Image (tube, helix red, strand yellow):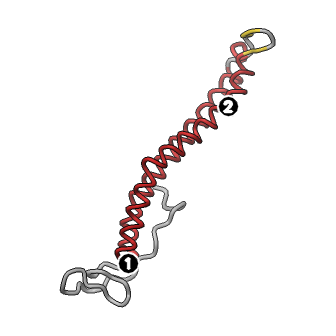
Amino acid sequence: MYDDVFPAPAQAPATAPTPGPAATSASGSVNGQPRAARQADDVAPLRAAYAWQRRIAGATVLGFFALYVLLTVYVPSATGAGLGEGLNLGLVLGLLQLPVTVAALIVYERTALRRIDPLVDRARARREEGR
């Protein structure tokens, strides 16, 4: 889905499987699977997790902004409605864009620590094993 952003690494031509447990060739292939293919397998869940993160964060910030713009364009009487001394709904929604963006960034960071960092650690451990 996001291959144009995170292109898969070029895969080396497959070699014939070698006998024995986890036989490593000089080119870095293990049991006939090239290193590039193993790394692509390790990175696939990581790509999916990052794509999920980007979609949620982007939808949150852009959705709130779209709500603000649509209300301003199609229901100007609602955004012009007074909420108090010198405040109206349009001004409050405009001022809330910064806190919504900051909240989306904080949630993005926290979920990255919980969901993506363990995937990075696993991929890194597999990569170190394959060396």
Q: Residue at point 46% right, 72% down? A: 9
Circle 1 packing at 10 Å, graded few (<14), some (14-19), many (20+), is: some
Q: Is residue 72 left or right of residue 115?
A: right
From the viewer's side, name the closer residue of 118 and 57.
118
SS at mark 2 in the image = helix
Residue 26 screen position, x and y as percent: 36, 90
Q: Is residue 103 left or right of residue 87?
A: left
Residue 77 screen position, x and y as percent: 72, 13
Q: Is residue 80 above or below residue 96?
A: above
Q: Residue at point 58% right, 33% down? A: 63
Tag 2 and tag 1, C-beta contact below 8 Å: no
Query: Image quadrant of residue 75?
Result: top right
Instruction: Say the numbered circle drawn on residue 97.
Output: 2
Q: Residue at point 24% right, 80% down? A: 22
- Residue denoted by label 1: 35
Query: Image quadrant of residue 60?
Result: top right
- Amino acid type assigned to the residue bearing label 2 in the image: Gln
- Quarter in which the N terminus is drawn: bottom left
- Amino acid type assigned to the residue bearing label 1 in the image: Arg
Query: Image quadrant of residue 18?
Result: bottom left
Separation of disc 2 and disc 1 at Cα? 45 Å
SS at mark 1 in the image = helix
From the viewer's side, name the closer residue of 108 and 75.
108
Q: Residue at point 63% right, 37% down? A: 102
- Quarter in which the C terminus is drawn: bottom left
